[in-house]
Amino acid sequence: MKSAITVGLDGSPGSLAAAHWAAEEAQRRKLTLRLLHAWPLLVPEPAPLPAEVDQNYWAKRIVDDALSELQARHPGLSVVGELVADDAQQALLKAAAESEMVVLGSRGLGSVESYFLGDISMPIAARAEHAVVLIRAETDEASPRSTPRTADPVVAAVQLHGPCEDVLSFAFVTAEAWNAPLRVVHGRNLPLHAHVPWGTHHGVAEEIAQDAQEQMDQVLHGWREKFPGVAVTDVVRLESPAKAVLREAESAGLLAVGRRRHHPHPTGRLGPVAQAAVHHARCAVAVVPHD
């Protein structure tokens, strides 16, 4: 189901927030929305049984309730529900390979510091074949937003000295679909020789900033031509890449970060910027794999 967005459902407020976010995104991109619930104890579909003796009742209820709610809110949207008898992590990794993106909710543990520490979200984000978008349920005014406002920009984190085409592709396509501005940010730590007893050597800092800006201009040139309708700004900050990205994402509707597709660790790993983003960003976070 390549032309689909898959959302993982587990009955939690976080997964329902993810389903609503995914529905709006599927409608913008004219894709099918696939609601997936994995339950290893799922039994073969029996003849119609009363709810009190149907072992699949609650699994079906999770999907059916979400499907009905989303169809009522998005009457023109193609929505399909699917129950699979599989481990949730394996089912979602398979779905990620078959979908445009997978959307998951966090466990909603309360504080920003515990953002996205779920047993499923992090491994999927670290290993999935395509982009994984992480959404947190909105519980009060201080909580992260699960649905962007029209003016909320898309923010993309780029490293410039490595692959960033996949992250930029995701960010530009999203910004175009949202009719939103795009902000591309690069953070770069100053080398040791740029630090002097009285602070920062301005000449060295300016040279590094100019070099980074030239690289940024070169990277974005083709993308600006390919997406002339997207208003793009770029930001170069001479500080920790993670701090730079989080600072720029404070007012974002979505933050796109990259991670290596073929990580030497067998379970996959997120880099420091992606780790910081999924733990501390207050907006939706898209983890985009790259070679």
Image: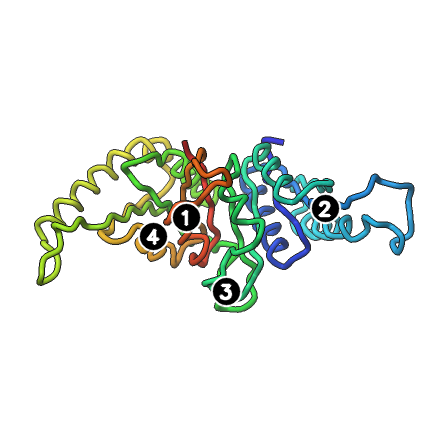
Residue 253 percent across, percent down from the top left: 45, 53
Q: Are marks 3 and 2 in contact (CB under 8 Å)?
A: no
Tag 2 or tag 4, which sits nearer the N-term?
A: 2
User: Callout 1: 10 Å neighbours few (<14), some, many (20+)?
Assistant: many
Q: Nearer the viewer, residue 197 or 212?
A: 197
The amino acid type found where label 4 is placed reads: Ala
Q: Are marks 4 and 2 in contact (CB under 8 Å)?
A: no
Q: Disc 1 versus disc 2: distance between alpha carbons?
A: 29 Å
Q: Disc 4 versus disc 2: distance between alpha carbons?
A: 36 Å
* Residue that numbered label 4 is attached to: 242
Task: Tell which residue pokes out farthest to the bottom in this image.
Answer: 141
The amino acid type found where label 3 is placed reads: Ser
Q: Which residue is drawn at 9% across and 63% down?
A: 198
Q: Which residue is drawn at 34% across and 52% down?
A: 242
The amino acid type found where label 1 is placed reads: Ala
Tag 2 or tag 1, which sits nearer the N-term?
A: 2
* Residue that numbered label 1 is attached to: 274
Q: Disc 4 versus disc 3: distance between alpha carbons?
A: 21 Å
User: Callout 4: 10 Å neighbours few (<14), some, many (20+)?
Assistant: some
Q: Disc 3 versus disc 2: distance between alpha carbons?
A: 30 Å
Residue 233 percent across, percent down from the top left: 30, 46
* Residue that numbered label 2 is attached to: 39
* Residue that numbered label 3 is attached to: 143
Quarter of the N terminus within the rendering: top right
Q: Which of 262 and 230 is in front in this view?
A: 262
Q: Nearer the viewer, residue 127 or 29?
A: 127
The amino acid type found where label 2 is placed reads: Trp
User: Callout 2: 10 Å neighbours few (<14), some, many (20+)?
Assistant: some
Tag 3 or tag 1, which sits nearer the N-term?
A: 3
Tag 4 or tag 1, which sits nearer the N-term?
A: 4
